[in-house]
Image (tube, rainbow, N blue to C red):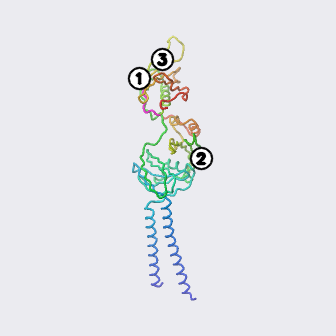
Amino acid sequence: MNPSTNARSGRENLIWLVISLVVFGCFYIIVTAYLDRINTGVLDIVASKDAALISVSSTGSQASVLGTGSASARLKPGTYRVVATTSDREAIKIIKIYKQQRSSLRLLLEPSARVPSVDNIEFEGLNSLVDAGLSVSQVNYVHDGLGAFAPSAKKISIISSSVQPGPHDPNSSDPNFSLNFTVVVDGKNYRASAYYTDLENVHLVVSSSAGALLYDSAKPTAASAPND
Amino acid sequence: MDRKIIKRLVLISVLLLGLVGASLVVKAVLLNRVQVIRLAPASSLAGVVSQSLSPVESSNLPQEGEDYTLSRTRYFYNKDWVVSVIQTKAGDKTVLVLQSKDGVYYPVLGPGSAFPQSSLQNLPQGVKQYVTDMVASYEPLD
């Protein structure tokens, strides 16, 4: 065989190799696409905010971003946790995906879930306790105690006109003083008493209008909060 | 090179490019132009934690093992609450508290390394104790 025939044969082999690889690659693309089609389900997601970042995860897997505002994805059958978030709002939903089925999910973003906190309660009338003789630190203690009594309350008001000193004999050497007052938690009235012996400590007790003990700051877990 | 051979090579190239293009069109039609998402395996909490963290460069979520690791994960009250420590590549450690409602974990505290006392106050006792041992608590200045 002469060199020119050898070169031609080598070139032909190379051409056929390239053709085979490309055809195989195309075949692979189509077969995997077909398998993905029959083995996955489609999830369409629309978030209530266009800027919301939409992501998906499942137990034992990493999370993946799908898009912002709206997204569609093919997922293997299973249970997924879909989240849409902006800087201050989020929506979390669990959805099951089935083979060859299309599912839709609309995510309504709401303020992020937070632990109830005394910081989120609006207080009113605390100054009336200062006017009646409690120190600022004692009032802060009452503030936190009322927050612990009603952690999920939206508004707690102390009725200024109800703040009255408890009975105390001016000639007695007894160091115990008290203030009785009415506290309104989200529209419901309670009786409260603040007991103190100095300018630092205070002991808060909250009772129902009928007189049943509901909260005692000395043993906060023994009584029940109004939300219970 | 022979002109005839060049012509043949060009023809083959065009045919192959057409074949690749046609394959991609078939793929798009088969999948209805919807992207297939394959989630990489990770620890059981990785996805939830990643979704609780801020995105990286606005379009990617941090990934466990790549951007952070989880440690000291502890479940409380029949897995209704879970606390985990997130350590970033830079070595920063933060605590994340999640609560399960109807089987869905919601981040309720963190990630952070210091929390106002009022935020810790309403956690269940066991969770509060575990978190308090790992973070600083403070009284915010009004």
Label 2, secondary structure: give it. strand
To which residue does mark 1 refer? A160
To which residue does mark 3 refer? A166
Amino acid type for the residue under numbered disc 1? Ser
Label 1, secondary structure: give it. helix
Chain name for mark 2: B
Residues under labels 3 and 2: Cα distance? 53 Å
- What residue is drawn where x is 47% and y is 83%? B5
Residue B41 percent coordinates (x, y)? 56, 55
Residue range of the region highlighted in magenta in the rendering = A152-157
Q: Is B94 included in the stretch rendered in magenta?
A: no
**To which quarter of the image does residue A127 belong?**
top left
Amino acid type for the residue under numbered disc 3? Gly
User: How many circles with numbers are drawn on the protein?
Assistant: 3
Amino acid type for the residue under numbered disc 2? Ser
Residues under labels 1 and 3: Cα distance? 15 Å
Quadrant into which the N terminus of chain A falls:
bottom right
**To which quarter of the image does residue A125 belong?**
top left
Q: Nearer the viewer, residue B36 or A131?
A: B36
To which residue does mark 2 refer? B71
Residue A51 percent coordinates (x, y)? 40, 50
Q: Is A156 included in the stretch rendered in magenta?
A: yes
Label 3, secondary structure: give it. loop
Mark 3 residue crowding within 10 angstroms, few (<14) / some (14–19) / many (20+) = some
Residues under labels 2 and 1: Cα distance? 51 Å
Q: Which mark is residue A39?
A: none
Q: Earlier in the sequence, mark 1 or mark 3?
A: 1
